[in-house]
Image (cartoon, rainbow, N blue to C red):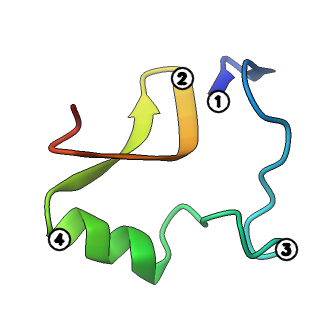
Amino acid sequence: MIDNGHILAGSFWKPNKNRYSIPLNCQLVKILQKYGFERGLWGSRKDYMHFSYFGT
């Protein structure tokens, strides 16, 4: 999780370089969004690996 450029949790997110890092607009993200899931991008906080149903 990143807040205003400061790492709060985790320290490794390298999309397209590491298979465990989910790119911002990949096919998985599009499929999850199609079914009502939202990515953890809340204002200045970015939790790139978090998805929740209807953004809750």
Answer with left or right where residue 39 lies relative to residue 24: left
Is 54 rendered above or below residue 44?
below
Which comes sooner in the sequence, label 4 or label 2?
4
Which comes sooner in the sequence, label 2 or label 1?
1
Label 1 packing within 10 angstroms: few (<14), some (14-19), many (20+): some
Q: Label 2, label 1: how many angstroms apart (C-alpha)?
A: 7 Å
Asked if the residues shown at circle 3 and circle 2 are in contact, with their CB atoms under 8 angstroms apart, the answer is no
Q: Amino acid at mark 1?
A: Met
Q: Label 3, label 2: how many angstroms apart (C-alpha)?
A: 23 Å
Which residue shows up at 64% across the image and 30% down it?
1
- Which residue in the protein does label 3 denote? 17
- Which residue in the protein does label 2 denote? 45
Which residue shows up at 24% across the image and 63% down it?
33
Q: Amino acid at mark 3?
A: Lys
Q: Label 1, label 3: how many angstroms apart (C-alpha)?
A: 18 Å
Which comes sooner in the sequence, label 3 or label 4?
3
The image position of residue 48, as x and y in percent, is 57, 46
Which comes sooner in the sequence, label 3 or label 2?
3
Which residue shows up at 71% across the image and 67% down it?
20
Number of disc labels: 4
Q: Label 3, label 4: how many angstroms apart (C-alpha)?
A: 25 Å
Answer with left or right where residue 29 lies relative to residue 53: right
Answer with the quarter of the image where residue 8 lies.
top right
Q: Amino acid at mark 4?
A: Lys
Which comes sooner in the sequence, label 1 or label 3?
1
- Which residue in the protein does label 1 denote? 1
Asked if the residues shown at circle 2 and circle 1 are in contact, with their CB atoms under 8 angstroms apart, the answer is yes
Q: Residue furthest bottom?
A: 27
- Which residue in the protein does label 4 denote? 34
The image position of residue 40, as x and y in percent, is 43, 38
Which comes sooner in the sequence, label 1 or label 4?
1
Label 4 packing within 10 angstroms: few (<14), some (14-19), many (20+): few
